[in-house]
């Protein structure tokens, strides 16, 4: 499908990077090979130590649609994502992980959906999961049963089931600006490991129209260096942001939060039964405590 670049909106692909030398070239090339051509690619390296930055300079320093930036000191996940986003200027934005794989029609399919319904704010795509050393891709279990179309009650869906990955979404800039934390840090992302999920909760909270397209258009890599695979890393991050949630999600949030804490307690108990060695008792105590806060 040919795209008229002059009359098509600019799409910003923001790629925050840290130590992904094994994968970053394939990810960037996925976007360079998109059928949709009116793009800018912003890569923000968070002081990588594995040769990522050297590879980026060697491969892409002279590419006119790619802008490379590097932090002098490691900023951490949320802040690096903010730095990357703030350098973008497109009408639509993709916050891409530096190790995932995207279909050649990821952007063109997104723009087609937006053009058919001007009220859509975010398009979320289906994805498959690829485990290292295993050539077989698996569907995302959390997305089974979700049909194409606008998501009804996205807050409950994102907060409890979490079927979406924000790196496989394309968002209108206006909705991201609306979702910024003007009463906290005036930025898009919190400084936490789960900043992408937290932003999705916030976007769903402000009444956004989220469209789900269930055809797999991307592949999520699972490998040893995924920070999300840490056994309790994401639970710790969830508790880190709870006090802030009480502040900016207001009274209506507390009932939802109570239900989520009950869910967390159940998951922790199940985890203890399956694998008591290394179990974090403090997290179970924290979950129970927060039920009565």
Image (spheres, grey):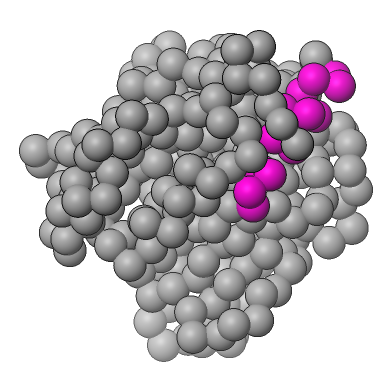
Viewer-proximal residue, 191 or 218? 218
Q: Say if the magenta span includes residue 113.
A: yes
In the rendering, at what x and y percent does residue 138 appear?
70, 74
Viewer-proximal residue, 201 or 210? 210
Identify the image quadrant of residue 109. top right
Viewer-proximal residue, 293 or 1? 1
In the rendering, at what x and y percent does residue 179 appear?
55, 19
In the rendering, at what x and y percent does residue 19 appear?
25, 59
Across the whole image, how many numbered discs are drawn on residues?
Answer: 0
Answer whether residue 126 is visible to the viewer in this image: yes
Q: Say if the magenta span includes residue 145.
A: no
In this rendering, is residue 95 above or below 117? below
The quarter of the image holding the N terminus is top right
In this rendering, is residue 102 above or below 32? below
Identify the image quadrant of residue 280. bottom left
Q: Residue furthest left?
A: 72
In this rendering, is residue 241 above or below 236? above
In the rendering, at what x and y percent does residue 80 appear?
29, 37
Instruction: Tell me if 201 is positioned left or right of 66 in this view.
Output: right
Q: Main secondary structure of the magenta part?
A: helix
Viewer-proximal residue, 34 or 134? 34
At x 38%, y 75%, the residue is 224
At x 22%, y 55%, the residue is 55
Identify the image quadrant of residue 195. top left
Answer whether residue 78 is visible to the viewer in this image: no
Instruction: Tell me if 261 is positioned left or right of 123 in this view.
Output: left
At x 62%, y 33%, the residue is 36
At x 80%, y 14%, the residue is 118
- Residue segment shown in magenta: 103-117
């Amino acid at each position: 499908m040919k795209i008229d670049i002059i009359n098509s909106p600019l799409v910003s692909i923001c790629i925050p990077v840290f130590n992904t030398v094994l994968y970053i070239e394939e990810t960037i090339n996925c976007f360079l090979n998109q059928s949709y051509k009116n793009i800018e690619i912003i890569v923000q390296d968070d002081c990588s130590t594995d040769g990522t930055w050297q590879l980026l300079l060697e491969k892409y320093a002279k590419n006119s649609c790619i802008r490379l930036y590097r932090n002098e000191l490691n900023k951490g996940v949320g802040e690096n994502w903010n730095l990357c986003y703030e350098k973008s200027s497109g009408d639509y934005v993709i916050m891409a992980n530096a190790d995932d794989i995207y279909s050649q029609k990821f952007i063109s399919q997104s723009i087609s959906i937006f053009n058919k319904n001007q009220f859509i704010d975010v398009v979320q795509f289906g994805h498959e999961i690829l485990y290292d050393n295993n050539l077989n891709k698996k569907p995302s279990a959390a997305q089974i049963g979700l049909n194409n179309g606008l998501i009804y009650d996205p807050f409950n869906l994102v907060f409890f089931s979490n079927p979406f990955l924000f790196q496989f979404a394309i968002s209108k800039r206006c909705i991201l600006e609306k979702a910024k934390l003007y009463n906290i840090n005036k930025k898009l992302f919190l400084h936490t490991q789960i900043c992408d999920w937290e932003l999705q909760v916030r976007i769903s909270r402000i009444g956004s129209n989220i469209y789900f397209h269930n055809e797999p258009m991307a592949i999520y890599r699972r490998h040893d260096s995924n920070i999300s695979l840490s056994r309790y890393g994401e639970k710790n991050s969830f508790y880190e942001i709870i006090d802030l949630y009480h502040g900016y999600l207001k009274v209506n949030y507390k009932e939802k939060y109570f239900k989520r804490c009950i869910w967390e307690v159940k998951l922790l108990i199940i985890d203890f039964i399956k694998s008591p060695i290394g179990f974090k008792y403090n997290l179970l105590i924290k979950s129970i405590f927060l039920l009565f806060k």
